[in-house]
Image (tube, rainbow, N blue to C red):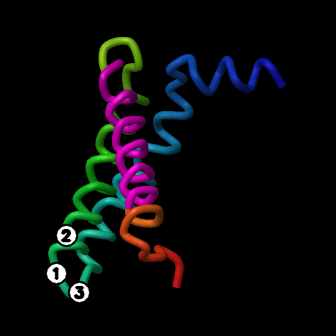
């Protein structure tokens, strides 16, 4: 099991060529399939597209693009912080 984690986070070409096309496909399809382009939908799609591009860069060369993985982490942190603020202080539930 330890070998799996070493391969996953070592900059393996197999992991890159497996995940990069899927991430790119998700980013393109989400952008093309979005129908009502409201402010909230546009922001969400742009955030997911940015995460996908940053993940591709981080998988391509983790040492050179170290900032890309941190950008993904920061984006997830901001999203969860916004959900916490909305739930705790604004009294609106994010679940439907």
Where does residue 61 sit, x and y in percent of width and height? Answer: 37, 20
Residue drawn at point x = 32 percent, y = 70 percent: 30
- Label 2 vs 1, first from the N-terminus: 1
Mark 3 nearby-residue class (10 Å; few <14, some 14–19, many ≥20): few
Residue drawn at point x = 43 percent, y = 73 percent: 91
- Label 2 vs 3, first from the N-terminus: 3
* Res 51 label: none
Residue range in magenta is 66-85
Distance from Cα at disc 3 to Cα at disc 1? 6 Å
Vertical side of 27 occupied by 90: above or below: below
Mark 1 nearby-residue class (10 Å; few <14, some 14–19, many ≥20): few
Q: Which residue is mark 1?
A: 37
The answer to whether the residue labelled 2 contacts the one labelled 3, judged by CB atoms less than 8 Å apart, is no
Q: Which residue is mark 3?
A: 35
Residue at disc 3, secondary structure: loop
Distance from Cα at disc 2 to Cα at disc 1? 6 Å
């Amino acid at each position: 099991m330890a070998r799996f984690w070493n391969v996953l986070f070592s900059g393996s070409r197999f992991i890159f060529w497996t995940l990069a096309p899927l991430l790119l496909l998700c980013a393109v399809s989400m952008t093309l399939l979005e129908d009502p382009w409201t402010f909230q939908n546009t922001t969400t799609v742009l955030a997911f597209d940015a995460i996908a591009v940053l993940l591709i860069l981080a998988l391509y060369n983790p040492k050179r693009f170290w900032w890309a993985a941190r950008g993904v982490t920061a984006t997830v942190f901001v999203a969860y912080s916004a959900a916490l603020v909305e739930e705790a202080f604004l009294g609106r539930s994010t679940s439907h």
